[in-house]
Image (cartoon, rainbow, N blue to C red):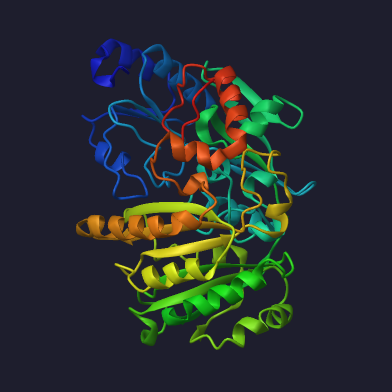
């Protein structure tokens, strides 16, 4: 049984606070309720203490304090984790939001990023240099969480997952020590953090390879939900054979309102959101088969790369109610698309939706053992999200999400992309790492034998 912060003597906490440059926030402090908020408004955890770190020394001190006092310890970067695994009840939260910096090196097109940054801050810094790091689809997502879980996004087919572009990281380990990991230093740890999550230590900075991306051709095409089976069959036969420069994820969704035209509002659709790193003329040629399918709405054009990364930010601000379920898939068979039609026709709230992200192109050309991300041979990373601004909808969106997932799960590859998992237990974690779990467990046993870093998609130390 872990100790709780409230059991600690006040003098112990005072001594700890005096060792920090950052601040401590406790339940008695005025900013506590604001400080414990995360992206998912459904999460309502009450930490005993949040340490707002401003440098690596604060992180090291916090790890040592948590370990020495046998406290449950959580690590929060951007706070986007669906299951709220950046928080814990009654324990210690190490908050990295004060560790922010982005430095672009144009001599080799690399980018150093702080452990507390979000991706919009990285895009802002890299864009003037005509560079981008492959990462996600929402700019408020934390760099740390997305990277450590894998990093699927608009550029995955062209430049791979985020972990495929990670060159180096600085880490604080469970014993409070500081290390740098790369292909040449602490190679086992470098392997483990490229998909193994926050199990092995706290990453205080990342070094990424950036790529020449200034503008993209992007935006959605929509078809009535009744055409889901037809569109999914076409999409499956199309997306994996086109050049890597073209990405498009397929979705079932409701159009909630502005900025979309009024005739779309409140209706269910099957849609594809495109991102192409070439010219408009080349996109028009490649995407002509999609346009020949007569979408009811197509709004695809040239935009700065940061614009496509922020396309959904306005619809998905922090604080909404979220419930997630996910799986990998190899096929969009008639049975699978029939379920997507059924549940896509029953979407319970305007923001609830399903996405299938293609795992092909560059993302599929990395070996299944080269990183912990074991499903390189899967065709899609699928996620179903129930979303609403209204806490009264929590049960409704959760039930729809679970029912949708249970109908599809028999057709899945068995595991899920860990960044899409809620707090679903060991069986799901092991299924998501598949053949790489045993190796991860051994590395966990070497660097964190007492499982200090346990509030995550947890890998048990062997």
- Residue at 55% over, 71% down: 273
For the point 37% across and 15% down, the residue is 70
Q: Quadrant of the C terminus?
A: top right
Left or right of 125 in this view: 393: left
Residue 115: horizontal and vertical position, in percent?
54, 37
**Viewer-proximal residue, 18 or 34?**
34
Left or right side of 154 for 386: left
Q: Considering only vertical position in the picture, is 213 above or below 89? A: below
Q: Quadrant of residue 158?
A: bottom right
Q: Where does the image place residue 40, in percent across and percent down from the top left?
A: 34, 50
Residue lying furthest right in this view? 107
Instruction: Work out which quarter of the rendered image holds the N terminus and state it.
Output: top left
Q: Is residue 61 above or below residue 221?
A: above
Residue 230: percent from left, percent from top: 53, 79
Residue 140 visible to an observer of this rendering? no
- Compared to residue 107, the image places residue 221 above or below, namely below
Please tell me which residue lies in front, 460 or 257.
460
Q: Residue at x 69, y 78 (%)?
A: 283
């Amino acid at each position: 049984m872990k100790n709780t912060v409230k059991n600690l003597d006040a003098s112990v906490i005072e001594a700890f606070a005096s060792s920090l440059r950052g601040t401590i926030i406790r339940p008695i402090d005025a900013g506590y309720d604001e400080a414990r908020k995360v992206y998912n408004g459904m999460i309502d955890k009450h930490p005993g203490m949040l340490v707002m770190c401003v440098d690596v020394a604060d992180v090291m001190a916090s790890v040592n304090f948590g370990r020495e006092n046998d406290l449950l310890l959580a690590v929060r970067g951007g706070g986007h984790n669906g299951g709220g695994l950046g928080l814990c009840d009654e324990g210690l939260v190490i908050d990295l939001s004060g560790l922010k910096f982005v430095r672009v090196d144009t001599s080799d097109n690399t980018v150093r990023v702080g452990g507390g940054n979000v991706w919009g801050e990285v895009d802002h810094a890299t864009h003037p240099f005509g560079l981008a790091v492959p990462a996600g689809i929402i700019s408020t997502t934390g760099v740390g969480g997305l990277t450590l879980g894998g990093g699927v996004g608009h550029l995955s087919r062209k430049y791979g997952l985020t972990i495929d572009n990670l060159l180096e990281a600085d880490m604080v380990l469970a014993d409070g020590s500081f290390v740098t990991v790369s292909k040449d230093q602490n190679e086992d740890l470098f392997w483990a953090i490229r998909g193994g999550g926050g199990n092995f230590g706290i990453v205080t900075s990342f070094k990424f390879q950036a790529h020449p991306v200034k503008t993209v051709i992007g935006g959605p095409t929509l078809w009535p939900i009744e055409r889901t089976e037809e569109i999914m069959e076409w999409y499956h036969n199309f997306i994996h054979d086109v050049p890597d420069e073209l990405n498009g994820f397929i979705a079932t969704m409701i159009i909630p309102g502005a900025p979309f035209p009024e005739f779309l509002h409140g209706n269910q659709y099957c849609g594809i959101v495109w991102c192409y790193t070439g010219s408009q003329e080349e996109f028009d040629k490649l995407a002509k088969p999609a346009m020949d399918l007569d979408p009811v709405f197509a709004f695809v054009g040239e935009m700065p790369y940061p614009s496509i990364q922020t396309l959904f930010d306005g619809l998905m601000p922090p604080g909404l109610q979220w419930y997630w379920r996910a799986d990998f898939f190899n096929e969009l068979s008639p049975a699978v698309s029939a379920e997507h039609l059924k549940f896509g026709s029953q979407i319970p709230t305007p923001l609830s939706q399903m996405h299938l992200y293609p795992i092909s192109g560059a993302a599929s050309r990395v070996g299944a053992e080269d990183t912990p991300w074991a499903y390189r041979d899967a065709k899609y990373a699928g996620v179903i999200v129930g979303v609403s601004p209204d806490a009264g909808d929590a049960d409704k969106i959760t039930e729809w999400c679970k029912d949708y997932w249970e109908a599809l799960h028999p057709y899945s590859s068995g595991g899920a992309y860990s960044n899409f998992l809620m707090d679903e237990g060991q069986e799901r974690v092991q299924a998501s790492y598949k053949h790489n779990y045993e190796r991860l467990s051994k590395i966990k046993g070497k660097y964190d034998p007492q499982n200090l870093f346990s509030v995550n998609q947890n890998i048990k130390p062997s």
